[in-house]
Every structure is written in structure tokens, then in C-alpha cells.
Image (cartoon, grey):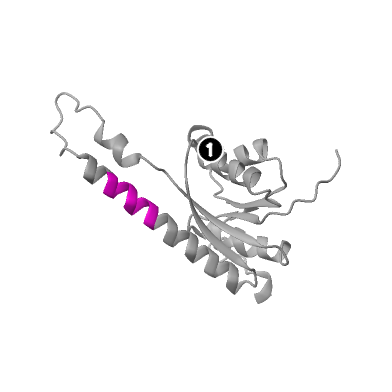
């Protein structure tokens, strides 16, 4: 397959987690001269989904959520995603990237949304962090990084993130202390 030169941005998936921050910093080093689009995906319509849930027998009745309240829930989630994306874009700028922020409504899954954006924007690559879940939880919860890798038509950089091991608990010192 021939290499394709894409003209769009490098898309950074950003949810505000330490794994996403780590991926952003690592991706900035790899794609230093490329324009960045920091994307926070939010689940549109969740307020309306909650308002339509049936009340189960033998449970305390749920407080009704009218359409105005459901709309407010969606607005609040969109605002939170916008703030998260802007915080990620600010971190990208601090890392030396020319970066914009985007809050994207989740139409199916986070992975589908990222792949769709990359396709629509002629994205050069997708960068995302791996939350290092174990094999059992990944099986039940799914894996956004796995799904992006499987469906993206552009290069994908998945940056593994693990918390630093406690060297003292293992009786070892970090390399810089030896």
C-alpha cells in the first residue's frame, strides 16, 4: 500500500486523564511540526436516555427528568467536554504544538467518533493513551485504542501509560538514584 500524505491535523484524544496527558506529551514529541486538534468526546443525549428509563418495581421512584432538565444535562456535559478539550489544547501549546480544541458528540462509540473525525478532517494521525486495563476488564469494557487501531484509515499512535512502580516497596532504587 502506498503512503498517503494527509493535510489535516493530528487528532489527540483527550479525556483529562493522566494517560491522555502522557499521550499528548509523547505525541507532541513525535508530531512536533504538525497541527494538533485536541478532541474530547462526550455522550450526547444521555440526559434524554435517563429521562426515558422505566421505573423498576420495588425500587424507590426516580425523580422525573423533564425535557428541560434532560437538555440541561446535555448542555452541562458538552460544556465539560469543551473545557476538557481546551485544557488539553493548552497543554499541547505548552508542549510546543499549534493546537485547537474540539468537543465532539459521540454518535456511537468514542473510537467510532475519533475514526470518523480523522476521516472527515483528513487527519494525519490519531494519538491516544492506553489506560492499561487488565485483559478481563478490557474484554468487558472494550478498548477504545484497540477499536481505533482496527478501524482507522490513518496512522495511530497508542501511548501506554502506567503509574510509576514503587521501587522502594520492591527493594529497588530507580536508575537515577544508583
Q: Main secondary structure of the magenta part?
A: helix
Span shown in magenta: 71-79
Q: Let me know if residue 83 appears in the view.
A: yes
Q: Is residue 6 above or below residue 166?
A: above
Q: Quadrant of residue 9?
A: bottom right
As helix, strand or loop, the secondary structure at mark 1 comes to helix
Q: Residue at x 45, y 60 (%)?
A: 84
Q: Position of residue 36 (x, y in %)?
A: 63, 61
Q: Is residue 12 above or below residue 155?
A: below
Q: Residue at x 49, y 57 (%)?
A: 17
Q: Quadrant of residue 96?
A: bottom right
In the image, residue 72 lies in the stretch drawn in magenta: yes
Classify 10 Å Cα crowding around label 1: few (below 14), some (14-19), many (20 and above). some
Q: Is residue 125 above or below residue 111?
A: below
Q: Is residue 169 left or right of residue 79?
A: right
Q: Quadrant of residue 111?
A: top right
Q: Let me know if residue 134 appears in the view.
A: no
Name the quadrant of the N terminus: top right
Give the tally of numbered discs: 1
Q: Residue furthest top?
A: 57
Q: Residue furthest right?
A: 2
Q: Residue at x 47, y 42 (%)?
A: 106
Name the quadrant of the C terminus: bottom right
Q: Position of residue 21 (x, y in %)?
A: 55, 62
Residue for badge 1: 138
Camera-nearest residue between 110 and 20:
110
Q: Position of residue 63 (x, y in %)?
A: 15, 39
Amino acid at each position: 500500500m502506498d503512503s498517503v500524505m494527509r493535510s489535516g491535523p493530528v487528532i489527540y484524544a483527550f479525556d483529562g486523564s493522566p494517560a491522555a496527558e502522557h499521550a499528548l506529551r509523547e505525541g507532541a514529541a513525535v508530531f512536533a511540526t504538525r497541527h494538533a486538534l485536541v478532541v474530547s468526546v462526550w455522550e450526547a443525549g444521555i440526559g434524554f436516555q435517563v429521562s426515558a428509563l422505566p421505573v423498576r418495581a420495588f425500587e424507590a421512584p426516580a425523580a422525573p427528568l423533564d425535557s428541560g432538565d434532560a437538555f440541561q444535562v446535555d448542555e452541562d456535559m458538552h460544556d465539560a467536554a469543551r473545557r476538557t478539550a481546551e485544557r488539553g489544547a493548552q497543554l499541547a501549546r505548552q508542549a510546543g504544538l499549534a493546537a485547537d480544541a474540539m468537543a465532539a458528540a459521540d454518535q456511537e462509540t468514542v473510537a467510532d467518533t475519533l475514526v470518523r473525525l480523522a476521516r472527515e478532517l483528513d487527519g494525519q494521525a490519531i494519538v491516544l493513551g492506553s489506560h492499561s486495563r487488565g485483559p478481563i476488564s478490557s474484554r468487558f469494557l472494550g478498548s477504545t485504542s484497540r477499536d481505533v487501531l482496527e478501524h482507522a484509515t490513518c496512522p495511530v499512535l497508542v501511548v501506554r501509560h502506567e503509574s510509576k512502580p514503587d521501587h522502594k516497596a520492591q527493594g529497588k532504587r530507580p536508575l537515577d538514584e544508583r
